[in-house]
Image (tube, rainbow, N blue to C red):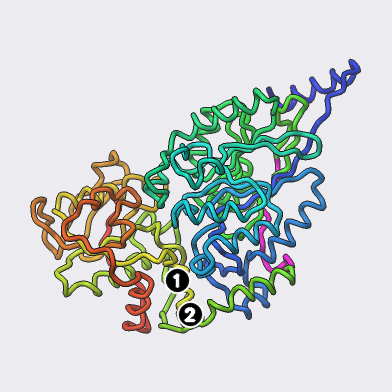
Amino acid sequence: MSVRLLTSVAALALSAGTAMADYSLTILHTNDFHARFEPISAYDSGCSAEDNTEGKCFGGSARLVTAVEEARARAGNSILVDGGDQFQGTLFYTYYKGKLAAEMMNKLGYDAMTVGNHEFDDGPEVLRGFMDAVNFPVLMSNADVSAEPLLADTLMKSTTIEVGGEMIGLIGLTPQDTDELASPGDNITFSDPSEAVQGEVDKLTAEGVNKIVVLSHSGYKVDQTVAANTTGVDVIVGGHTNTYLSNSAENAEGPYPTMVGDTAIVSAYAYGKFLGELNVTFDDEGNILSAEGEPLIMDGAVTEDETTVARIAEAAVPLDEIRNKVVAETAEEIVGARDVCRAMECGMGNLIADAMLERVADQGIEIAIANSGGIRASIDAGEVTMGEVLTVLPFQNTLSTFQVTGATFVEALENGVSQMEEGAGRFPQVAGVTFTVDPSAEAGSRISDVMVGGAPIEPEKVYGVVSNNYVRNGGDGYAMFKDAMNAYDFGPDLADVTAEYIAANAPYTPYTDGRITVK
């Protein structure tokens, strides 16, 4: 039903003496925060105190505290929700795991969040500890956790909360391939998002709930698919693909909200750089009369809450010695941007792959392959601190060496480029090998002209390969490596290897050399 028609119906109802009460709700939202408790730079990495004082930084928990308080004051009815991936991304997570995230989310007064794939990086144990520490429900509808004792009686698919006398239904959603993206263990199985959401919508509507919000850590395209394939979903708060939606910014990937049928989809980029603010008005039947808003940028104009600044500074003390250590120098920015490294050869990808290969070249290793999903930031020109390197490579992955046939390695490359149109993290960055990819070809037949050491790859020949332990154990769809020959997963930390390589080549000059050709 159109907004104009709904308005007419409301007017007729009022004139007939049966008043229909419109209900307004402000949905404040974040996603993909990734332990960015401190302000970030324009490169989504650490930002110095000097730059922060000069107003050059963004985000941080202290700005969010102020912005959320101000938004609630002007909103009336409001909820604060999160689209997943609070975990992983800085030394704060490495050191505190989920404890600091729980503390800050409680302070901000979140009403609910969905499970992101990175919430499973350290298995169900750390997720359960986080869930026990927070004052709000953590949700995930498209998974069967009944065989996982740590989550079976705790992790709900959906819930309801009362806001201003109305019941709001909330449903969680996580990537269907979380078993490939993280470490949920063998006791959890993931399922189709649309079917899972519709099942929960049907339960909620049977209980009389007619205002339903999905908290989705599944990506912008999946969110649009879910909206098209389900009925009864009013709003989807997105995450996972770090999608920036806006009605005014030139670099936005779509409007805020993106409407698919009667469903409003919103997303607020990542790292606490924005606070999403969607104002929705419902009629008495739960239909959306209007949905409008814009992500609010958390820049220097947003005052930092002093109490929160002090708490984060206190929490940072154990980390400072490590991250403030200057380890190298770079002549110019090393590009590690998500939209570049997940689509083509990039400077950061070459650096990491080169560093991996050089470290183990004396072991008969010929090829390096890294997943671009493991590259989390760029590094600006000048001094390089260990903190910056750890922001790029926060996952504590170790070098893994192994052997596979040429045919298996080509299969791995095909997996790597199979979802490049979606910006998937499996896109491969390489060293010691060159290849051509045709994104317009069908997935599984996109790779050609694979050369190792200047010679065509031989399908039956066995090659020595280095990657990280996550990829070697099947992460990001690289299942063909799980049964590799002579696998050793316990090499040095990838961040340390990269830092030492930059130092040895300082001042490091990033480059691309055509090792990946995209048709």
Write down the region rendered in magenta.
292-304
Amino acid at dot 2: Ile
10 Å neighbourhood of mark 2: few (<14), some, or many (≥20)? few
Q: Residue at x 58, y 62 (%)?
A: 99
What residue is disc 1 on? Answer: 390
Q: Residue at x 48, y 75 (%)?
A: 387
Q: Are marks 2 and 1 in contact (CB under 8 Å)?
A: yes
Alpha-carbon span between mark 2 and mark 1: 10 Å
User: Is 253 placed left or right of 13 in the picture?
Assistant: left
In the figure, 309 relative to 469: above or below? Answer: below
Q: Residue at x 57, y 64 (%)?
A: 36
Q: Residue at x 67, y 73 (%)?
A: 55
Q: Earlier in the sequence, mark 2 or mark 1?
A: 2
10 Å neighbourhood of mark 1: few (<14), some, or many (≥20)? many
User: Is 496 placed left or right of 230 in the picture?
Assistant: left
Q: Select label 2 or label 1 by which is in front.
A: 2
User: Is 183 placed left or right of 363 in the picture?
Assistant: right
| The one of 165 and 517 positioned closer to us in this rendering | 165
Q: In the current view of this chain or complex, which residue is farthest to the top?
A: 16
Q: Secondary structure at mark 2?
A: helix
